[in-house]
Amino acid sequence: MESSKRGLPVPPALLGFLFLLVALTSLSYGAGRMAGPVAPGMHRTVPSEQNLEPGMSDMHGLGAVGDRVVVSR
Protein backbone atom coordinates (compact mmCIF):
# COMPACT_ATOMS: atom_id res chain seq x y z
CA MET A 1 0.00 0.00 0.00
CA GLU A 2 1.23 3.38 -0.94
CA SER A 3 0.94 6.16 1.57
CA SER A 4 -0.59 9.33 0.26
CA LYS A 5 1.74 11.58 2.25
CA ARG A 6 2.11 14.91 0.51
CA GLY A 7 4.58 17.56 1.64
CA LEU A 8 4.15 21.28 1.50
CA PRO A 9 4.43 22.68 -2.02
CA VAL A 10 6.84 25.32 -0.65
CA PRO A 11 9.83 24.46 1.56
CA PRO A 12 9.39 25.62 5.18
CA ALA A 13 12.75 27.43 5.08
CA LEU A 14 11.47 29.63 2.25
CA LEU A 15 8.29 30.44 4.17
CA GLY A 16 10.36 31.31 7.25
CA PHE A 17 12.64 33.55 5.23
CA LEU A 18 9.72 35.39 3.64
CA PHE A 19 8.06 35.85 7.03
CA LEU A 20 11.31 37.22 8.50
CA LEU A 21 11.77 39.52 5.52
CA VAL A 22 8.25 40.96 5.84
CA ALA A 23 8.59 41.32 9.63
CA LEU A 24 11.92 43.18 9.44
CA THR A 25 10.70 45.41 6.62
CA SER A 26 7.58 46.39 8.55
CA LEU A 27 9.59 47.05 11.73
CA SER A 28 12.03 49.20 9.79
CA TYR A 29 9.21 51.14 8.15
CA GLY A 30 7.53 51.68 11.51
CA ALA A 31 10.75 52.93 13.12
CA GLY A 32 11.29 55.33 10.23
CA ARG A 33 7.76 56.67 10.49
CA MET A 34 8.19 57.22 14.24
CA ALA A 35 11.54 58.99 13.79
CA GLY A 36 10.16 61.41 11.21
CA PRO A 37 12.05 63.21 8.47
CA VAL A 38 15.84 63.35 8.67
CA ALA A 39 16.16 67.09 8.03
CA PRO A 40 12.73 68.78 8.13
CA GLY A 41 14.07 72.30 7.52
CA MET A 42 16.30 71.40 4.59
CA HIS A 43 15.10 72.60 1.21
CA ARG A 44 16.69 72.63 -2.19
CA THR A 45 17.54 76.22 -3.05
CA VAL A 46 17.93 77.79 -6.46
CA PRO A 47 21.22 79.69 -6.81
CA SER A 48 20.76 83.44 -7.08
CA GLU A 49 23.21 83.86 -9.94
CA GLN A 50 23.78 81.47 -12.81
CA ASN A 51 27.22 79.87 -12.97
CA LEU A 52 28.60 80.65 -16.43
CA GLU A 53 31.69 78.41 -16.15
CA PRO A 54 31.64 75.15 -18.11
CA GLY A 55 31.48 71.93 -16.19
CA MET A 56 29.49 70.78 -13.23
CA SER A 57 28.11 73.51 -10.98
CA ASP A 58 28.96 71.60 -7.78
CA MET A 59 32.69 71.41 -8.45
CA HIS A 60 33.58 74.93 -7.16
CA GLY A 61 35.78 76.27 -9.93
CA LEU A 62 37.31 73.06 -11.23
CA GLY A 63 35.82 73.72 -14.65
CA ALA A 64 35.22 71.25 -17.41
CA VAL A 65 37.15 68.02 -17.63
CA GLY A 66 40.13 68.49 -19.93
CA ASP A 67 39.87 72.29 -19.72
CA ARG A 68 43.51 72.72 -18.75
CA VAL A 69 46.31 70.23 -18.34
CA VAL A 70 49.10 70.91 -15.86
CA VAL A 71 52.20 68.74 -16.07
CA SER A 72 54.79 69.02 -13.32
CA ARG A 73 58.04 67.13 -12.92
Image (cartoon, rainbow, N blue to C red):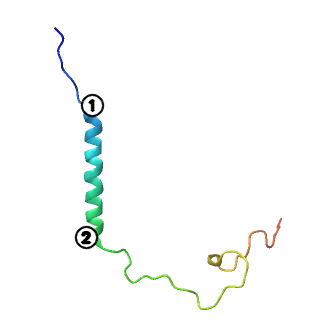
Amino acid type shown at disc 1: Pro
Counting labels gives 2
As drawn, the label of residue 43 is: none
Relative image position of residue 5 (x, y in whole percent): 18, 20
Relative image position of residue 35 (x, y in whole percent): 28, 71
Q: Nearer the viewer, mark 2 or mark 1?
A: 1
Measuring 27% from the left and 57% from the top, which residue is drawn there? Answer: 26
In the picture of the structure, the residue carrying the numbered disc 1 is 9
Q: Quadrant of residue 39?
A: bottom left
Q: Residues within 10 Å of mark 1 (few under 14, many from 20)?
A: few
Q: Is residue 50 above or below residue 7?
A: below
Measuring 65% from the left and 79% from the top, which residue is drawn there? Answer: 60
Relative image position of residue 12 (x, y in whole percent): 25, 34
Measuring 66% from the left and 75% from the top, which residue is drawn there? Answer: 56
In the picture of the structure, the residue carrying the numbered disc 2 is 34
Q: Nearer the viewer, residue 65 or 16?
A: 16
Q: Quadrant of residue 59?
A: bottom right
On the picture, is 71 further left or further right than 40?
right
* Secondary structure state at the residue bearing disc 2: helix
Q: Nearer the viewer, residue 11 or 49?
A: 11
Counting residues from the start of the chain, the first of labels 2 and 1 encountered is 1
- Distance, label 2 to label 1, CA atoms, is 38 Å
Measuring 17% from the left and 14% from the top, which residue is drawn there? Answer: 3
Q: Is residue 47 above or below residue 67?
A: below
Relative image position of residue 65 (x, y in whole percent): 74, 69
Quadrant in which the C terminus is drawn: bottom right
* Secondary structure state at the residue bearing disc 1: loop
Amino acid type shown at disc 2: Met
Q: Residue furthest bottom?
A: 48
Quadrant in which the N terminus is drawn: top left
